[in-house]
Amino acid sequence: MFSRLREDIANIMARDPAARTALEVVWCYPGFHAIVMHRWAAFCWQNEFKLVGRFISLIARILTGIEIHPAATIGRRVFIDHGFGVVIGETADVGDDCTIYQGVTLGGTSLGKGIKRHPTLARGVIVGAGAKILGSFTVGEGAKVGSNAVVVKAVPAGATAVGNPARIVQKEINNAKEEAAARMFAAYGVTPNGDDPLSKALHGLIDNAAAQEHQIACIVALLKSAGIACDGLPLLDKFDPDQLNRLVE
C-alpha cells in the first residue's frame, strides 16, 4: 500500500510543475485523495460490502468534487489534475499513466445492467478539461482528447480527438524526443500540430478556390488579348482568401 502511495506522489511531482513537495501533494491535491479513497471503496465493493463502497465514494465526491464509482477500474500512476467535476462511471477502465483534467466525464450511453457501458482508456491517455467520452469503446494507447471534446467512437492509439462530435487527428510526431515529451505532458490534451481536421479541410478548400480564381483571371486576360469579348460575364465581389482563412481559424 505504501509503495503505491509513494508511486502516486512521485508521479504527481513529475507531471505537475506546480507541485513543490510531497507533503503538499498529500495534503492539497484532491486528485490524489480521490484515487486513495477509490481504492478503499473498490476493496469494499469487491468484497461484497457494496453499500460501504458506495458510501466511501460519496464521501470522496463531497470532499474532492471527483466521483469515481467503486466498480470502476483505475490503473497505476493515474493523475487527476484539479479534478473538480470529474465523473468516472461503473464499468469505466482507466489504464496506467493516464491524465484526466477537471470536468471530464467517462459516461455510459446504455441502460443495460451487467454489461460494459463506459469507455476504456488505454495506457498513457490524456483527457483535456471538460471532455466527455461516452460509450463502450476504447481510447487507444497514448491518445489525447482535447478540451471540451465529445467522443462517441473509438480513438486510435496515438491520435488526438477534438471537437463536438470529436474528429480524429492522427499524430504527427517527427522524432522520438518529441514523442516522449508529448507522452509525458500535453496540457489539457493540447498538442503541437493538433489542428481541427475540419478547419484544415476548410483552409484547403479556400486555398483551392483562390487558385481557381487566379487561373480564371488568367484565362479571361488571354481571351481579351485574343480579341474575344468577355463583357457578358457577371461581376462578382473580390475573393479574399486571407479574410476567409481568418474566419475559419
Image: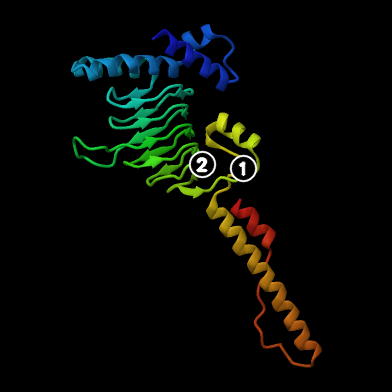
Q: Which residue is depicted at the point 62% across and 63% down?
A: 206
Report crowding for label 1: few under 14, some 14 to 19, many 20 or more residues within 10 A (C-alpha).
some
Relative depth, front residue between 168 and 66: 168
Q: Which residue is depicted at the point 75% across and 88% down?
A: 223
Q: Position of residue 23 (x, y in %)?
A: 52, 6
Q: Position of residue 242 (x, y in %)?
A: 69, 58
Which numbered disc flags the more N-terminal residue, 2 or 1? Answer: 2
Reply above or below: 14 against 99.
Answer: above
Q: Does residue 98 appear left or right of residue 47 in this picture?
A: right
Task: Determine whether the residue tagged by mark 1 lies in a helix, strand or loop.
Answer: loop
Rendering quarter of residue 232 = bottom right
Q: Residue 164 got which mark?
A: none
Check disc 1 and give the amino acid type. Ile
Q: Position of residue 148 (x, y in %)?
A: 46, 39
Q: Which residue is depicted at the point 54% across and 52% down?
A: 197
Reply above or below: 46 against 232.
Answer: above
Q: Which residue is depicted at the point 29% across and 25% down?
A: 69
Work out whether residue 72 can be spotted: yes
Q: Position of residue 178 (x, y in %)?
A: 64, 36
Check disc 2 and give the amino acid type. Gly
Rendering quarter of residue 59 = top left
Please give the residue where the numbered disc 2 appears in the rendered image: 158
Rendered-image quadrant of the N terminus: top left
Q: Are marks 2 and 1 in contact (CB under 8 Å)?
A: yes
